[in-house]
Image (cartoon, helix red, strand yellow):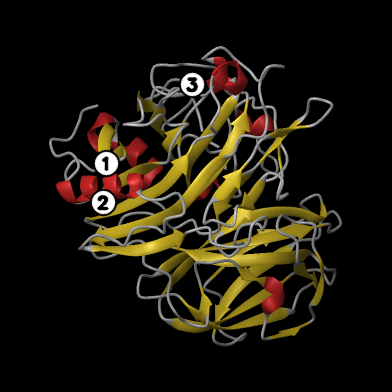
Amino acid sequence: MSASSGIPRPRPAHRRPLRRALVAAVATLGLAAALATAATAPADASAPAPPSGWSQVFVDDFDGAAGSGVNTSNWQYDTGTSYPGGAANWGTGEVETMTSSTNNVALDGNGNLLITPRRDASGNWTSGRIETTRTDFQPPAGGKLRVEARIQMPNVTGDAAVGYWPAFWMLGAPFRGNYQNWPGVGELDVMENVNGLNKTWATMHCGTSPGGPCNETTGLGNSTACPNTTCQSGFHTYTMEWDRSVSPEAIRFYVDGVNYQTVTANQVDATTWANATNHGFFVILNVAMGGGFPAAFGGGPTGATDPGHPMAVDYVQVLQSGGGGGTTPPPTGNRDAYSAIQAESYDSQSGTSTETTTDTGGGQDIGSLAGGDWALYKGVNFGSTAATQFYARVASGAASGVSGLVEVRLDSPGNAPIGSFAVGNTGGWQSWRTIPANIGAVTGTHDVYLTFTSGQPADFVNVNWFDFGH
């Protein structure tokens, strides 16, 4: 989330999991018709079936019991006031504390996700922020990617809405675990809104900050009123379509099938575009309170701001079309390489132990990991499009000078690693970080071994979960 086009405002130089030439062709009738249908569907509607020529990469209809949390195979919670080691207040000056509590993030039992800001008796705000576990959403070469959600913004306006900042957006995969490389790794804001205004903003962030080729911290953006009903009084479908089938490559933004913002590759230099787009992305849903964007429209929250108005999300889905590579639908094997594999779910192991974790989502991690230890995860399906990245959620309270390698091996613990990363003390055995690594290209189904190598005999790491990306 970030400043929108034409509204400069200060922000830290580093921030993360945050946040013109028009192409001649705009939305096809098929896209416009599909989104118009989705926009007028009942509030508990399922995601629409993919149009002809498109396949579904990801979907969450948020079906589940009222008061339950999100599916943690699809989503992870961001909690607190920053990413680990990232800029304070999520890099934008917002004032809330994000939680995983169902008071802030919960299903309503009617097929919707509710993200609800709340204020306690002392005036402290809490809210919710979730992001997909997958980070590999990008168009195939020569094809298209469509990311969309059907959302009703918090139904509050006027003084009571001052400070509300709901958003549906995406960050480049290299941001996860780094938190210092914004805006170069790219940010795509599919929907932002502030202070209960009947407007949706769409923005691409890239390049350097402040200034640079993408006019940061403002970015390359535009806004429009929601069609027919206000953004607050009804559901609308917000869509980003990333098109690699045209030259120059284009990223288009829609509300209810109406294209109101397009960014093309020739608007910036080739290096800036490549740094912002030559990788996968992950999706974020959140409602912030206060910060730079609301400040640009009068500020807030204030004593008049009314808490308890949720952003309601009917569904989120990702589609792709054409091309010969890039993101693929999750495979159907025993384990999905592109969803979080919980470390404690091993099929066999040597030298590990399990313990309760305080990391986001709870559950267990594996610990007591030292040189020579390993854990096996059978039947991991990588699909037909090669995985080239590995991510692991790790923590370490190792003594000074103690470190080691977390390695990935296929089919035998004696085979050469296809990739690894080094890790030492992260600040404590429950101080978690997501660390990425490049791996050799992998397709098909394999048994995956996590192996641990160190030059010291001491334990050096805990692991909560891991997954792979393209």
- Dot 1 crowding, Cα within 10 Å, few <14, some 14–19, many 20+: many
Q: Residue at x 71, y 34 (%)?
A: 118
Distance in Å between CA atoms under marks 3 and 1: 33 Å
Q: Residue at x 52, y 14 (%)?
A: 297
The label shown at residue 34 is 2
- Dot 2 crowding, Cα within 10 Å, few <14, some 14–19, many 20+: some
Q: What element carries label 2?
A: helix
Residue 181 x, y percent position in the rendering = 53, 38
| Residue behind mark 1 | 257
| Residue behind mark 3 | 210
Instruction: Look at the picture and state if 278 lies above or below 345.
Output: above
Q: Quadrant of residue 256?
A: top left
Residue 378 x, y percent position in the rendering = 58, 85
Task: Give the farthest residue toward the front.
Answer: 42
Q: Quadrant of residue 395?
A: bottom right
Q: Quadrant of residue 451?
A: bottom right
Residue 198 x, y percent position in the rendering = 42, 24
Residue kind at label 3, given as amino acid type: Pro
**Going from the N terminus, do you reach mark 3 or mark 2 first?**
2
- Label 2 with label 1: CB-CB less than 8 Å: yes
Residue kind at label 2, given as amino acid type: Ala
Instruction: Look at the picture and state if 4 lies above or below 31.
Output: above
